[in-house]
Amino acid sequence: MWVPWYWWPIGLGVAALLAAELHMGAPGMYAWLPYVLLLPVSIWALLRLSRSKVEVVDGELVVGRAHLPVEVVSRGVVVPASAKSAAMGRQLDPAAFVQHRPWVRTMALIVLDDPEDPTPYWLVSTRRPSELLAALGCGESPEK
């Protein structure tokens, strides 16, 4: 789930401006050091934000470092962009597992049926929620 393309020039621009400010404040032999340090840090931060994966592998739903066996999935539903704020707002259960990326518009709500797990559902940002639910065996068509 890559960050939007326009975040890259903004992130690199902010890092370059900050490096230029530090360069102007402390000119001299090590004036190049802020550029060498801050530009790679901004690239690292953007790559780190884009690192999250949502996939179904070997009978498990893998979201980042969290794993969920497919057997405990009861049902699922697509959360369209129009209902995302309601799902993330007052309707959100505090015990739910949430993997939210603000730049991804749609989400999948995956309801669990596991008496040993206090988590009622997973709410996961994904660009293809219908495909995720189909891979989990909860083939519900998206709401329109």
Image: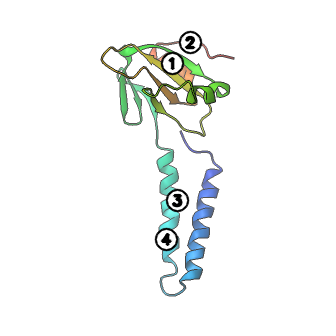
Residue under the image location 46 percent in, 17 percent down: 111
Q: CA distance from mark 3 to mark 1?
A: 34 Å
Question: Relative to 25, does residue 13 appear above or below in the rendering?
Answer: above
Q: What residue sits right under mark 1 in the picture?
A: 133
Q: Are marks 2 and 1 in contact (CB under 8 Å)?
A: yes
Q: Kindly identify the amino acid type of the residue bearing the numbered disc 1.
A: Leu
Q: Residues within 10 Å of mark 3 (few under 14, many from 20)?
A: some
Upstream in sequence: badge 4 or badge 1 = 4
Q: What residue sits right under mark 3 in the picture?
A: 42
Q: Determine the secondary structure under disc 4.
A: helix
Quarter-of-image position of residue 69: top left
Which quadrant would the C terminus be assigned to in this image?
top right
The answer to whether one can see residue 33 in this image is: yes
Q: Mark on residue 36?
A: 4
Answer with left or right where residue 129 lies relative to residue 61. right
Residue 105 on image: x %, y %: 62, 33
Q: Determine the secondary structure under disc 3.
A: helix
Q: What residue sits right under mark 2 in the picture?
A: 140
